[in-house]
Amino acid sequence: MKIDPSSPADLSAQIAKAIRDAIIAGDLIVDARLPSEAELSEQFEVSRPTVREALKRLAAQSLIRTQRGATGGAFVNRLSYQDAYGQQITTSTLLLSMNDISFDVACEARFALERACAPLSAQRRTPDQLATMRAEIVRQGQPGLTDEAFCASDVAFHRALVDGAGNPVMSYQLAGAVEAMQPLMNMITFTARSRDRIISLHTRIADALEVQDAASADSALLELQSYTAQLGQTRAAETSESVPKV
Amino acid sequence: MKIDPSSPADLSAQIAKAIRDAIIAGDLIVDARLPSEAELSEQFEVSRPTVREALKRLAAQSLIRTQRGATGGAFVNRLSYQDAYGQQITTSTLLLSMNDISFDVACEARFALERACAPLSAQRRTPDQLATMRAEIVRQGQPGLTDEAFCASDVAFHRALVDGAGNPVMSYQLAGAVEAMQPLMNMITFTARSRDRIISLHTRIADALEVQDAASADSALLELQSYTAQLGQTRAAETSESVPKV
DNA sequence: TGCAAGATAAATGTCTGACAATTAGAAAAA
DNA sequence: TTTTTCTAATTGTCAGACATTTATCTTGCA
């Protein structure tokens, strides 16, 4: 773990990289305690604030956690699915909002990945996950629901679908794709008519998963994809914006 | 943008969250300049080192960049695909290495997502992407290639396949799934026989994409998935380890 | 006037030293 | 033995200072 002392700037970034590389390479295993800030500042020959800035960078990536007190210090963190979800969602959301992603492209990606989950979900979905989907369908049918709440319920439904695949790696990867779409979906005004259509497709999906019919689930997802894309087109036309391409 | 002054600890985390929320909410748009560190320390009523720790947290997530000099400061960063890729890969790699993910689960996720790309890639792959795939296939056939180099070439091949879908959102999502598998793949010893098999399947995939035959590409990917899973099983048996389940 | 060199100011990057807060463990007292 | 107190180690925060970088302004010269 060495840094380049010849470049007097970005010391904290260099130190963070050195420690991060040590973690990735396995030199620092989970729950291992890093040297104290004072020791690190001696090792790297920098001041304590600089070391602290480096540690905060790592903490922002959930790579370490810190404890105060006599036996405290910085410890290598076991990256939990929850932490990873959170980062994945933040990054995906910002990526979409900052890069003029067209609704079409985001929509295509989301449904392509979801359709990859559907066959697995048809095999493995638990009764609990099915119940979650049904509950969200009921919620989506309630009158007086705001567009935002409708979208949030939509996200919850699709996350249950994704989790149904019983593969946490896929759930992690898909979390970003599904959640990051919400801000874009929130820009759509859902008429009573379009809600009915979506609810009916959601019901078809849930029914298909219940009887483990992967093909039906897939076709319903395909219809939902084209309908969602169509809603996006309508929005683009109404607001007289040309949807910017990537 | 307010913080809770009653809890005297984790001030930098609170400040980072306040600024991050402002960015996500759109209150701070891309390339907007944040107040100087001195001004921020006045606004939040904390010291400058504390403000700096908060800014370093945001910099670690590529949410801001800093410039020195008279017109310098911290600016809201446009999250580029490259930055997002990097974070996605780091997070995915650590998630897999730290959580005893079984080879089967990771393999299933990877191929399920890749198969979602294949139909799109069959439609849209550019000649350039096809050439990349062919070149990697040639490399994979060279004798004397280490297992690591073979895996790296494998990753490059599959990334070209994914990029062929022409959907940057999917490329971003898939980058993690494909790259994060490499450390697990690196643990496999590739015999000449297994390399031949993989190369032949890669060739089938490239051929299918060339003639835009989505079905053939999918079936080749399915075969590759089961063969890869089989290699993983062999490794598990040879090393006498039971592959830990999640 | 026009241009180049230097001075200036603003901002980040880093350092030093200090004190506060927290926590585990050792020491002391009941 | 149990409870209480003390101590030491560590992170969290602060204040002030200096170094470095960079755009802009000023000055001097042709």
Image (spheres, coloured by chain):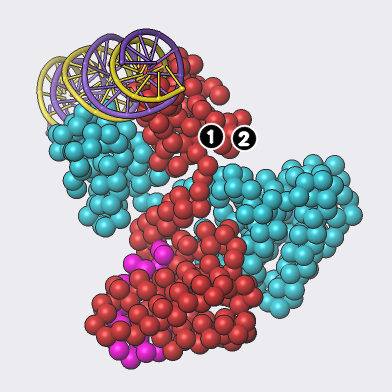
Chain colours: A red, B cyan, C purple, D yellow
Q: Chain of mark 2?
A: A
Quarter holding residue B71: top left
Vertical relation: B17 (above or below) A12: below
**What kind of element bears circle 1?**
loop
Q: Is residue D16 left or right of residue B232?
A: left
Q: Which residues are magenta?
A: A179-198
In front here: A220 or C14? A220
The percent position of residue A156, horizontal first and vertical second, equals 42, 70
What residue would you read off at disc 1?
A31
Image quarter in which the C terminus of chain B is found:
bottom right
Determine whether B45 is above or below B133 in the image: above
Residue B243 located within the stretch drawn in magenta: no
Across and down, in percent, residue B98 comes to: 59, 44
Determine crowd level at label 2: few under 14, some 14-19, many 20+ residues with C-alpha closer than 10 A. Answer: few
Q: Is residue A221 above or below residue B234?
A: below
| 1 and 2 marks in contact (CB < 8 Å) | no
Q: Which mark is residue A25?
A: 2
Q: Is residue A137 left or right of residue B172?
A: left
Question: Tag 2's secondary structure?
Answer: helix
The chain carrying label 1 is A
Residue B139: in sight, yes or no? Answer: no
The quadrant in which residue B195 appears is bottom right
- Disc 2 marks a residue whose amino acid type is Ala
Question: Residue furthest toward the right?
Answer: B193
Residue B13, percent across and down? 31, 40
Disc 1 from disc 2: Cα separation: 15 Å
Give the residue type that dot 1 points to: Asp
The residue that appears at 85% across and 55% down in the rendered structure is B194
Q: Residue at x 43, y 51 (%)?
A: A87
In the image, D2 versus A196, the foreground residue is D2
x%, y% of residue A123? 64, 75
